[in-house]
Image: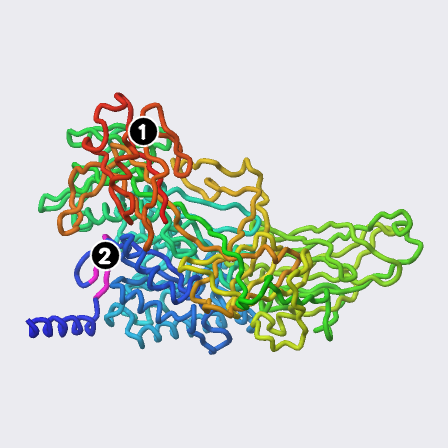
Amino acid sequence: MKLCFFLCLLCSFAFLALGSNVSYDGRSLIIDGQRKLLLSASIHYPRSVPAMWPSLVQTAKEGGIDVIETYVFWNGHELSPGNYYFGGRFDLVKFVKIVQQAGMHLILRIGPFVAAEWNYGGVPVWLHYIPGTVFRTYNQPFMSHMQNFTTYIVNLMKQEKLFASQGGPIILSQIENEYGYYENFYKEDGKKYAMWAAKMAVAQNTGVPWIMCQQWDAPDPVIDTCNSFYCDQFKPTSPNRPKIWTENWPGWFKTFGGRNPHRPAEDVAYAVARFFQKGGSVQNYYMYHGGTNFGRTAGGPFITTSYDYDAPIDEYGLPRFPKWGHLKELHRAIKLCEPVLLNGKSVNITLGPSVEADVYTDESGACAAFIANIDDKNDRTVEFRNMSYHLPAWSVSILPDCKNVVFNTAKVSTQTHVVSMIDENLQQSDKGAVTFKWDVLKENAGIWGEADFVKTGFVDLINTTKDTTDYLWHTTSIYVGENEEFLKNGSKPVLLINSTGHALHAFVNQEYQGTGTGNGTHSPFFFKNPIPLRPGKNEIALLCLTVGLPTAGPFYDFVGAGLISVKIKGFNNGTVDLSSSAWSYKIGVQGEQLKLYQGDGSSSLKWTTTSKPPKGQALTWYKAVVDAPSGDEPIGLDMLHMGKGLAWLNGEEIGRYWARNSEFEEKDCVQECDYRGKFLPDKCDTDCGKPTQKWYHVPRSWFKPSGNTLVIFEEKGGDPTKIKFLRRKVTGACADVAEDYPSIGLDSQGEDKINKNTPFARLTCPGNTIISSVKFASFGTPTGKCGSYLLGSCHDPNSSTVVEKACLNKNDCVVKLAEENFKNNLCPGSSRKLAVEAICS
């Protein structure tokens, strides 16, 4: 026995040493001679922290995922020319090895332009200031640095033996990103650049294929791939290339001042099922876990710190039910079809108006079918192989044996989790403290020390700061004579500012006057505000700021930001134009340059300790020493009652916060989202008129048990006494399952099999919690949704008893919609279902 084990071990090591052969044809990727149908998940390593990576990867694997996909973030790695960083959240090698240890594949999207709502599209800002550089075109400075970085990453992966050809997990690499949208803007140089990029990548000799997404002229052997909400109709430009979907967007990103987008699980599942129905081979969710734009990594501009993306795993690392569970069941159903999908032949059959079946058969007699109802309003009942099938509108039924429906995209049988943010007031590490105390430091508005420079007129904000900070002070002064009419009648002159973006805070004689800002769809803005002026000299100080640099677009590297004009209306002689005045400039704010965010007390400035910190005070630093919140749940920081600024814990950058309400009216959002029909980013928005983001993820691994330093820089004024930590916790679970819902059975070994099972409701509480009570249970015709179920006209009075018997004091339970549990003759002529809401504690 020992000898057998030793020989098996040797064989395993020999396999790893030899590596895998990855090739492709017009049907699929081929790994070691075997066709593969692959389900992939985007998880960006710097948008979470190393302590989260193993659980994120494992949760994806448990969700039926085969492959992890990530970009490589150039500006996070090459901090200056030739100066590389791979520590902390940017430890790419560690992330890839965690994927390998999980027994999964990896797609490495080197880019190195990534877009991704990431600052400057991932390209280092310093590259823009190398003379003669133009991004993403046939431009020698850009191509030279791009090739150097690509080669560096490839060599790093080779050095660690991480390509599949070396025994590693990387089966595909990507060069460039969605360049097909912009190639024509660069004319002949665009085409030349795309061809050069492909040739340069292939010459890296990685031993695995290269892809280019949304690149319709990708040359062989590079594979062109699709990014969209739907890619079932996509066809590669060569019949010898497999059909790959690099970005299926299961949600969308948010911008400060925008709405909160959602994509229904039913529609995501529909899109995936249609893709594989029409010959797809690799499908990737962008994002499967969106994570957090820590620090100043968010781009846009105006992209929020949260990059949750309504993804199957939420920003905090928790599976998002029902989306995660519904897609897991979809993946199981698709995998049941895999052999015949990849090795069989398909026939398309029209079954009626807007209903079609794609039937796959092989020489062994195996058969699998996908039946789709693409009508976005009407359900359909059709005949297929002498059997009747009912399909809800905009849905796909999967029949792995061409007979039994094991999954329908519109029928969500998986549970819904009730997720709560549990308040946890900040606890002082000094246990003897009677009241919570803050250290407070107020900055002056405008120039401190010497100005960096003085100039007549305005400068470009980005070109001046070079993204070393969000902030650039502009200061000037204006003299007011005693005879001005507004001094006599009590009126106020009006400050008028025109700007190309992104935002500014206005101060007059050290007093905050207001904020002007653009938004995620339109960076320019016009600021108009009455201001108090006094006789004599008045100081005008404008704190102009960026909110993330542009991430994409033709010539986006030349898109600027900053003031166009500054005027004051209301003088006796009319409007005074300050645009051509002498302006003094200072890059950054003082506390930032003194690194007050480190919280180590090394600054020469004096903090004031108080239990009553000032409220509504602009340009103020707050510091407190706090304990770690109790428990082990993920942590959020509630900043709803603050204004705008930056936050740190123990010197780690939490990111930008902004308690900015959505600029949209209630009518622009939905109460209920209809999954049916084509999805667009604004189809299912919520939270109109409410803060775009109020909670900010603080990773557990950043905390020490006690003695943690929380630092806040508030730009415009807020109430620090209402800052608190929140624990993100699953407090309940709901299930809503009808009698006609399909399910996949498991044999005694836990393997999937195809049979007609009794539908069932499954409830699971996370971790060491149990189902402590049943809040609602009804078999019959209940209405409503999780959190607001109501009894219908038909109800089995034994429903609660049945559910409690199966579930109380258990972590996981199953309730079958079977005769032995519920009355068989209940609700004649009605479609019956079971709705349950349980409490987890």
Q: Mark 1 points at which residue?
A: 379
Q: Do the residues labelled 1 and 2 touch (CB within 8 Å)?
A: no
> Residue 369, relative to residue 163: is it above or below?
above
Across and down, in percent, residue 203 comes to 33, 71
The tally of labels here is 2
Range drawn in magenta: 21-31
- The answer to which of 556 and 567 lies nearer the viewer is 567
Name the kind of residue labelled 1 in the image. Answer: Asp
Which quadrant of the rendered structure holds the N terminus?
Answer: bottom left
Across and down, in percent, residue 48 comes to 42, 62
Please report whichever mark, 1 or 2, sits nearer to the chain's N-terminal start: 2
Across and down, in percent, residue 767 comes to 32, 55
Q: 400 left or right of 56?
A: left
Q: Which residue is drawn at 10% across and 46% down?
A: 363
Secondary structure beneath label 1: loop
Q: Can residue 286 be seen in this view?
A: no
- The answer to which of 816 and 108 lies nearer the viewer is 816
Of the numbered discs in the image, which one, if any, rests on residue 25?
Answer: 2
Mark 2: give few (<14), some (14-19) or many (20+) Cα within 10 Å.
Answer: few
Q: Residue at x 41, y 59 (%)?
A: 631
Residue 681 shown in magenta: no
Secondary structure beneath label 2: loop
Point out the residue furthest to the right here.
483
Mark 1: give few (<14), some (14-19) or many (20+) Cα within 10 Å.
Answer: some
> Residue 326, relative to residue 86: is it above or below?
above
Residue 30 shown in magenta: yes
Name the kind of residue labelled 2 in the image. Answer: Asp
Across and down, in percent, residue 581 comes to 79, 63
